[in-house]
């Protein structure tokens, strides 16, 4: 598990290898990840947007920006958490992702970024 805390917000990531398949006559590697965002601060916060950098050993880095996560903009009261799962397709059996969440503190109206730790993808047969 990969974990990082920024401004009282803890982000933990667990990854899984989901398998291989062909798409457009090319082999692809499917990875899943489950992220838990936990509010360790004393203030209520809301996740409003995300930024991802996706690293694939066989391709150039891809950047993705968007609103919320999985169609939601969760509000986290102190001591509460939000967990969601998603996935990533790579051309290589080895890769990684990292990024940040854009959040707003309801007490101070401050907008801030919460780092998402770099988490690695590796198909079991690719690990030596």
Image: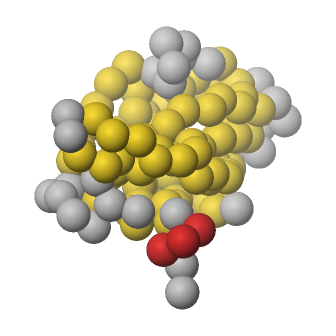
Q: Residue at x 50, y 37 (%)?
A: 87
The one nearer the camera, 75 or 93, is 93
The one nearer the camera, 67 or 15, is 15
Visual colour scheme? secondary structure
Give the number of marks.
0
The one nearer the camera, 48 or 118, is 118
Q: Residue at x 28, y 35 (%)?
A: 23
Taking the view exactly as shown, the residue that stands out farthest to the bottom is 128
The one nearer the camera, 39 or 120, is 120
Task: List x then y, in percent, for residue 108.
Answer: 55, 28
Taking the view exactly as shown, the residue that stands out farthest to the right is 79
Quadrant of res 41: top right
Taking the view exactly as shown, the residue that stands out farthest to the top is 71
Q: Residue at x 76, y 24 (%)?
A: 77
Reply above or below: 17 against 110.
below
Task: Residue 43: tell me if it is visible.
Answer: no
- Quadrant of the snapshot with the C terminus: bottom right
Task: List x then y, in percent, for residue 36.
Answer: 70, 40
Task: List x then y, in percent, for residue 13.
Answer: 64, 51
Task: List x then y, in percent, for residue 20.
Answer: 46, 47
Quadrant of res 92: bottom left
Task: Residue 60: tell me if it is visible.
Answer: yes
Tell me if 3 is positioned left or right of 42 in this view.
Answer: left
Q: Residue at x 18, y 58 (%)?
A: 59
Tell me if 106 is positioned left or right of 96 in this view.
Answer: right
- Quadrant of the snapshot with the N terminus: bottom right
């Amino acid at each position: 598990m990969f974990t990082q805390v920024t401004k009282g917000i803890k982000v933990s990531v667990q990854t899984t290898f989901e398998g291989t398949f062909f798409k457009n006559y090319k082999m692809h590697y499917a990875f899943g990840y489950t992220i838990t965002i936990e509010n360790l601060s004393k203030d209520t916060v809301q996740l409003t947007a995300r930024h991802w950098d996706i690293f694939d050993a066989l391709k150039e880095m891809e950047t993705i920006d968007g609103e919320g996560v999985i169609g939601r903009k969760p509000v986290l009261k102190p001591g509460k958490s939000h967990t969601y799962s998603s996935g990533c397709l790579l051309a290589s059996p080895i890769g990684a992702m990292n990024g940040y969440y854009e959040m707003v503190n309801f007490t101070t109206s401050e907008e801030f970024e919460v780092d998402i730790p770099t988490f690695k993808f590796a198909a079991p047969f690719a690990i030596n």
